[in-house]
């Protein structure tokens, strides 16, 4: 973790600091250094320091006002810690803060070491990774800062997601926080939250590795108790647990195991979140948990037989497939009215007959945070299956669910929610049953007349789409 510091050191405090061939502003520039770069000081002359930078393997002269001298003795540790505390909460100064943190860890004796410096260094490393992933960051500066911190043992993981590069800190310092016996509840909670981020999961992980990762995530989250946690941290912890348990539930259901207990745990964690404690900046964490649980929520419900003349059944198809067939009861037919197969999870407990349609709706979940609605209905004398997706503009995550049926206007009522580029959108819509064309939609069901009269009672009781 710590660079082998020389006896006389200085830390660069400005980006694009030139290293010149002589102690003069007109001398040739040999290279440029970034904040956080460590220099060995060898001489001082005319307002310049003669230095050597081991990262660049280059010596030369820098102006004295572009660097700060640091000591590495035990008596220097309090001053280094004070600077570290200041830089910990200063966005844009992560490389500089990590350099000071490394100096502090070199100066402080092992007997006096606490979790605080590891927590501070981890937070700055995490923030730097987020800046590197952001489309509004200055790529040149961030790339230079990543090179600077790498010399202190700060390692990043990179992967592509939806056409964009994601940079994530590997979390070694947060594991160090959890290993410190004296770490307080807030430090432990932040370490666990950093180590369980859903946006830092490699999308190319196979099912077995993803299952093992989610088991590790839920175990980490259970390490932190509620005692002495701030209100916001506590709600963040519950929201993260809810999202992780939703992932666990999906993986169990995909293997053919019961996912009911995991789904119920996810719902109970979600209910423990106090949304008002999160604030606007942290609200997306809760919305993401809601979306993931909405996608899997039918796993907590036991399927029952359909009422009416139509019967829906699910049987295994090709390896990994489930085939859903619709038939008429007592029709004397050997062949179903219509049949379709999928590699997704068919939630038979969601099957909803629409006797006056006639139609049947059922939820199908092909991905962890993506749930579709299959609508079996008659069109021009032929039974068809139309698939309604959560969104039409390629969102990242989403779900769509049956919310009722208006027989007078022959309109299907649905609710959709999607996450697109980090933003969450909810819509309530009325669709014509015959062709599923959109009649009208709104951001609230109260704005739609048919929702007021014909929304399904069970949907209103169970859905998470009506949260505020």
Image: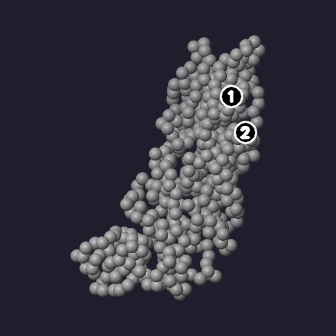
Residue position for label 2: 256
On the image, the x and y values in percent for residue 346 come to: 67, 33
**Above or below — where is 222 with respect to 44?**
above
On the image, the x and y values in percent for residue 462 come to: 68, 39
Would residue 138 be visible to someone looking at this image? Answer: yes
Q: In the image, what residue occupies the spot 61% across and 64% down?
A: 191
Quadrant that contains the N terminus: bottom right
Neighbourhood count class around disc 2 (C-alpha, 10 Å): few under 14, some 14–19, many 20 upward: few
Asked whether 42 or 375 is in front, the reply is: 42
Q: Quadrant of residue 386?
A: top right
Q: In the image, what residue occupies the spot 39% across and 58% down?
A: 139
On the image, the x and y values in percent for residue 90 come to: 46, 68
Q: Quadrant of residue 185?
A: bottom right
Asked whether 363 or 324 is in front, the reply is: 324
Q: Quadrant of residue 465?
A: top right
Q: In the image, what residue occupies the spot 72% across and 28% down?
A: 315
Q: Circle 1 — which element?
A: loop
Asked whether 202 or 306 is in front, the reply is: 202
User: For the residues marked 2 and 1, what is the alpha-carbon distance in whole angstroms?
Assistant: 14 Å
Residue position for label 1: 317
Q: Are marks 2 and 1 in contact (CB under 8 Å)?
A: no
Labels in figure, total: 2
Q: Name the side, left or right, on which 432 lies relative to 313.
A: left
Would residue 411 be visible to someone looking at this image? Answer: no
Q: In the image, what residue occupies the spot 44% across and 65% down?
A: 147
Extreme-left residue of the structure: 26
**Above or below — where is 214 with respect to 232?**
above
Neighbourhood count class around disc 1 (C-alpha, 10 Å): few under 14, some 14–19, many 20 upward: some
On the image, the x and y values in percent for residue 347 come to: 69, 34
């Amino acid at each position: 973790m710590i660079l082998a510091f020389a006896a006389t050191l200085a830390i660069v405090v400005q980006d694009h600091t030139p290293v010149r061939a002589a102690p003069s502003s007109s001398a040739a520039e040999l290279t440029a250094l970034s904040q956080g770069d460590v220099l060995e000081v060898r001489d001082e002359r005319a307002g310049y320091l003669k230095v050597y930078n081991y990262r660049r393997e280059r010596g030369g002269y820098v102006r004295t006002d572009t660097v700060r001298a640091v000591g590495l003795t035990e008596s220097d540790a309090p001053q280094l810690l004070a600077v570290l505390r200041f830089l910990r909460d200063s966005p844009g100064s992560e490389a500089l803060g990590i350099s000071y943190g490394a100096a502090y860890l070199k100066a402080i004796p092992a007997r006096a070491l606490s979790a605080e410096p590891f927590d501070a260094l981890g937070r700055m490393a995490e923030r730097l990774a987020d800046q590197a992933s952001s489309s509004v960051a200055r790529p040149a500066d961030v790339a230079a800062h990543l090179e600077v911190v790498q010399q202190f043992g700060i390692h990043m993981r990179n992967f592509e997601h939806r056409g964009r590069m994601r940079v994530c800190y590997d979390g070694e310092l947060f594991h160090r926080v959890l290993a410190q016996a004296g770490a307080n509840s807030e430090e432990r909670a932040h370490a666990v939250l950093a180590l369980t981020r859903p946006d830092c999961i490699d999308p190319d992980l196979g099912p077995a590795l993803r299952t093992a990762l989610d088991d590790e995530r839920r175990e980490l989250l259970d390490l932190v108790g509620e005692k002495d946690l701030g209100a916001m941290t506590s709600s963040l912890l519950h929201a993260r647990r809810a999202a992780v348990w939703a992932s666990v539930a999906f993986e169990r259901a995909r293997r053919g195991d019961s996912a009911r207990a995991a789904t119920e745990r996810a719902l109970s964690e979600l209910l423990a979140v106090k949304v008002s404690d999160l604030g606007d900046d942290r609200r997306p964490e809760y919305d993401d948990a809601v979306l993931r649980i909405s996608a899997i929520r039918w796993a907590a419900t036991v399927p029952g037989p359909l009422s009416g003349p139509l019967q829906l059944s699910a049987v295994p198809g090709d390896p990994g497939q489930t085939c859903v067939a619709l038939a008429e009861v007592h029709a004397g037919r050997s062949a179903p009215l219509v049949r379709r197969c999928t590699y997704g999870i068919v939630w038979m407990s969601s099957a909803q007959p629409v006797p006056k349609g006639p139609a049947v709706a059922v939820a199908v979940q092909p991905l962890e945070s993506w749930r579709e609605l299959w609508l079996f209905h008659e069109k021009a004398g032929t039974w068809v299956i139309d698939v309604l997706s959560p969104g039409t503009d390629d969102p990242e995550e989403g779900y769509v669910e049956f919310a009722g049926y208006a027989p007078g206007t022959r309109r299907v009522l649905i609710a959709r929610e999607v996450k697109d580029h980090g933003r969450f959108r909810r819509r309530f819509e009325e669709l014509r049953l015959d062709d599923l064309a959109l009649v009208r939609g709104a951001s609230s069901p109260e704005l739609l007349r048919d929702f007021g009269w014909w929304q399904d009672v069970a949907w209103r009781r169970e859905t998470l789409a009506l949260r505020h």
